[in-house]
Image (cartoon, rainbow, N blue to C red):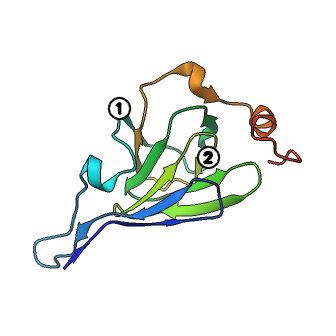
């Protein structure tokens, strides 16, 4: 059975949830595939993987000025919290068919990693240290959020 890619929005500005194209085959095994131009919101310029993250540790905890990111947990699971300064949502990334687009100017934190989690992050831009916003209060000021929270 082939399932096509589709996406949904959430309450956090610009964040979209993707169920990626995949084939369910209980005899030969399942397959997830995507074509950059058709199934992803941008053509990736780089990728990175996070893995072997202790459960109590967090990753991310930043936003980007210009870079968008697309996250898929290809093995195990982790939780993704996204925050636009007004709205906040959390998702469990626990299957290789589920991806989340985190646009620029959205704070993202990954946490609660299972011991076997492998998180694939596709980025719309090359690594640019100046693109990172690492201070949450500064982020809130930049997006014009009313009160600081964390």
Q: Residue at x 44, y 50 (%)?
A: 71
Q: Label 1 to label 2, Cα distance in Å?
A: 21 Å
Q: Position of residue 8 (x, y in %)?
A: 49, 67
Q: Secondary structure at mark 2?
A: strand
Instruction: Please give the label number shown on residue 58.
Output: none
Q: Residue at x 38, y 44 (%)?
A: 42
* Crowd class of label 2 (few under 14; some 14 to 19; many from 20; radius 10 Å): some
- Which residue has dot 2 on it? 109
Instruction: Please give the label number shown on residue 45.
Output: 1
Q: Quadrant of residue 34?
A: bottom left
Q: Earlier in the sequence, mark 1 or mark 2?
A: 1
32 left or right of 133 in image: left
Q: Are marks 1 and 2 in contact (CB under 8 Å)?
A: no
Residue 49 or residue 138, whichever sits in front:
138
Q: Is residue 61 visible?
A: yes
Q: Position of residue 122 (x, y in %)?
A: 39, 41
Please determine whether, in this image, residue 23 is positioned above or below residue 46: below
Please determine whether, in this image, residue 36 is positioned above or below residue 66: below
Q: Position of residue 113 (x, y in %)?
A: 52, 53
Dot in front, 1 or 2: 1
């Amino acid at each position: 059975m082939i399932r096509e890619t589709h996406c949904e929005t959430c309450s956090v500005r610009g964040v979209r949830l993707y169920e990626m194209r995949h084939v369910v085959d209980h005899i030969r095994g399942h397959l997830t595939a995507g074509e950059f131009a058709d199934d992803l919101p941008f053509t990736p310029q780089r990728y990175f993987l996070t893995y072997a993250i202790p459960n109590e540790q967090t990753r991310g905890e930043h936003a980007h000025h210009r870079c968008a990111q697309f996250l898929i947990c290809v093995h195990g699971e982790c939780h993704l919290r996204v925050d636009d300064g007004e709205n906040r949502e959390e998702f469990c990334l626990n299957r290789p068919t589920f991806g989340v687009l985190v646009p620029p100017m959205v704070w993202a934190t990954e946490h609660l990693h299972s011991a076997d989690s492998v998180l694939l992050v596709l980025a719309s831009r090359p690594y640019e240290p100046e693109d990172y916003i690492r201070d949450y209060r500064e982020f809130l000021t930049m997006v014009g959020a009313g009160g600081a929270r964390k």
